[in-house]
Image (cartoon, rainbow, N blue to C red):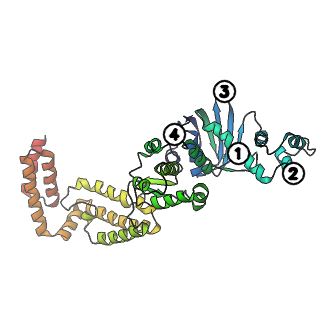
């Protein structure tokens, strides 16, 4: 992944509006980070596993530099502040160390860093030290999440100067921050944030690894994700059948969507899941092999040629390389590719006049062609009688494309006069 460098504004409201732009939205369109909240930026970093440095500046506040590696926060420093001193203050506030121990560590003749000296003098345990560093980073981050605007400058790939050995997982921080921000919210507060996806089907993405789920979600939350985000149920139905309360389920899917743990699609899976879908695709492939090229594309052999391109595009959207169907499993991808190959064969056969005419005659037969074009001729007359000029022209042009009889050509001339 190529390093990205950019700048802009981060706008924090200090309330639910800070969830207005999700991490996946920012990954899809990086310009959405400009004007988004700090939590969105953290989500973007986590999902992309970014490495680089982030500089935040605001009037009346000390500039803050954050260093990330593979999506984890390695360092956070406020200008004019020593991060180790911030950790020491935390340890004193929590009564992990006292003034005498701190004085002894500062007086260490070896000149070791203060945190190392405290540990080696047994003023604190390794667990105390790790927890204090983590808590200090989280406290400094809280100041970046609170209401206010920041000017940001991001340098992707830039080397990070580490201040300590503790890395803070960005996913874990955002989840914790969102839980804290929504702790007093009710379903009536959270429902509007899910309004655009409540009728869609949630699918678990590769972002939510088993390890992440184990760390970040409770047993009940993992169960709800497993049952309600398998692509067979809309979010609305998933909320109704959840093991959690309405508010808790809203919160879970708000967090999951914000961090890209689930994505919401307009098309769901069959109730049997992936296995059922694979069976349906196999059946569709066999059926399409026996259909004529027109029906494969969802058109009739009498359809006007101007509709072929649009019909082919719809099929490509459904079965082509970018289709959602291919993402469900390797088998789905293989079957969808085979179906798309049939669509390619169909459009190549019927898109030109000569090959279309030959194929139609071979597939439909002369007698059916005569009967069908006679029917179109009558339908064109009927449309002409109703003064539906455009429809009449399309119908008669379809007939001429199939069989350019003299009476068809004369009727087209008559219709064109009305159109003009």
Q: Position of residue 211 (x, y in %)?
A: 61, 60
- For label 1, the crowd category at 10 Å Cα-Cα, with few meaning under 14, some 14 to 19 and many 20 or more, is some
Q: Which residue is mark 1?
A: 135
* Residues at discs 2 and 3 in contact (Cβ within 8 Å): no
Q: Considering only order in the chain, which callout, 4 or 2, is on the residue closer to the N terminus?
A: 4
Q: Which residue is mark 2?
A: 120
Q: Dot 2: what SS?
A: helix
- Quadrant assignment, res 282: bottom left
Q: Dot 4: what SS?
A: helix
Q: CA distance from mark 4 to mark 3?
A: 25 Å
**Number of the front mark, 2 or 3:** 2
**Number of the front mark, 1 or 3:** 1
Residue 96 visible in the picture: yes
Work out whether 116 lies above or below 368.
above
**Which of the pair 53/122 is nearer the observer?**
122
Q: Which residue is mark 3?
A: 60
Q: Position of residue 154 (x, y in %)?
A: 62, 40
Q: Considering only order in the chain, which callout, 1 or 4, is on the residue closer to the N terminus?
A: 4
Q: Which residue is mark 4?
A: 16
Q: CA distance from mark 2 to mark 1?
A: 21 Å
Work out whether 191 lies above or below 233.
above
Question: What quarter of the picture does the C terminus occupy?
Answer: top left
């Amino acid at each position: 992944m190529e390093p990205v460098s950019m700048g802009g504004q981060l706008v924090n409201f200090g309330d639910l509006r800070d969830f207005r732009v999700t991490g996946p939205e920012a990954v899809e369109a990086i310009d959405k980070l400009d004007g988004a909240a700090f939590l969105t930026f953290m989500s973007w970093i986590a999902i992309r596993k970014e490495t680089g440095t982030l500089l935040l500046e605001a009037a009346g506040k000390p500039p803050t530099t954050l260093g990330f590696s593979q999506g984890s926060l390695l360092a956070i420093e406020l200008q004019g502040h020593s991060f180790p001193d911030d950790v020491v203050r935390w340890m004193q506030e929590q009564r992990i160390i006292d003034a005498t121990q701190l004085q002894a560590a500062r007086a260490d003749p070896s000149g070791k860093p203060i945190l190392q000296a405290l540990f080696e003098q047994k003023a604190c345990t390794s667990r105390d030290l790790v927890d204090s560093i983590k808590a200090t980073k989280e406290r400094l981050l809280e100041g970046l999440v609170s209401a206010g605007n920041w000017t940001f400058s991001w340098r992707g790939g830039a080397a990070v100067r580490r201040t300590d050995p503790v890395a803070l997982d960005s996913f874990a921080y955002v989840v914790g921050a969102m839980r804290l921000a929504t702790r007093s919210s009710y379903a009536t507060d959270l429902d509007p944030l899910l309004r655009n996806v409540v009728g869609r089907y949630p699918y678990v993405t590769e972002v939510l690894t088993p390890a992440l789920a184990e760390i970040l979600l409770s047993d009940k939350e993992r169960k709800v994700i497993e049952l309600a985000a398998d692509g067979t149920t809309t979010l609305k139905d998933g909320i109704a059948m959840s093991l959690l309360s309405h508010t808790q389920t809203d919160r879970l899917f708000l967090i999951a969507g914000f961090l890209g743990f689930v994505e919401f699609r307009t098309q769901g899976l069959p109730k049997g899941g992936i296995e059922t879908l694979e069976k349906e695709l196999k059946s569709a492939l066999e059926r399409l092999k026996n259909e004529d090229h027109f029906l494969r594309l969802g058109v009739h052999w009498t359809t006007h040629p101007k509709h072929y391109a649009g019909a082919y595009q719809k099929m490509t959207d459904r079965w082509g390389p970018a289709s959602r169907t291919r993402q469900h499993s390797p088998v789905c991808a293989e079957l969808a590719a085979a179906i798309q190959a049939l669509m390619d064969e169909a459009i190549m056969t019927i898109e030109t006049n000569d090959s279309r005419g030959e194929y139609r005659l071979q597939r439909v037969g002369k007698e059916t062609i005569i009967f069908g074009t006679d029917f179109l001729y009558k339908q064109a007359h009927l449309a002409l009688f109703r003064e539906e000029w455009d429809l009449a022209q399309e119908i008669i042009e379809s007939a001429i494309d199939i069989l350019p009889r003299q009476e068809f050509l004369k009727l087209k001339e008559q219709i064109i006069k009305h159109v003009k």
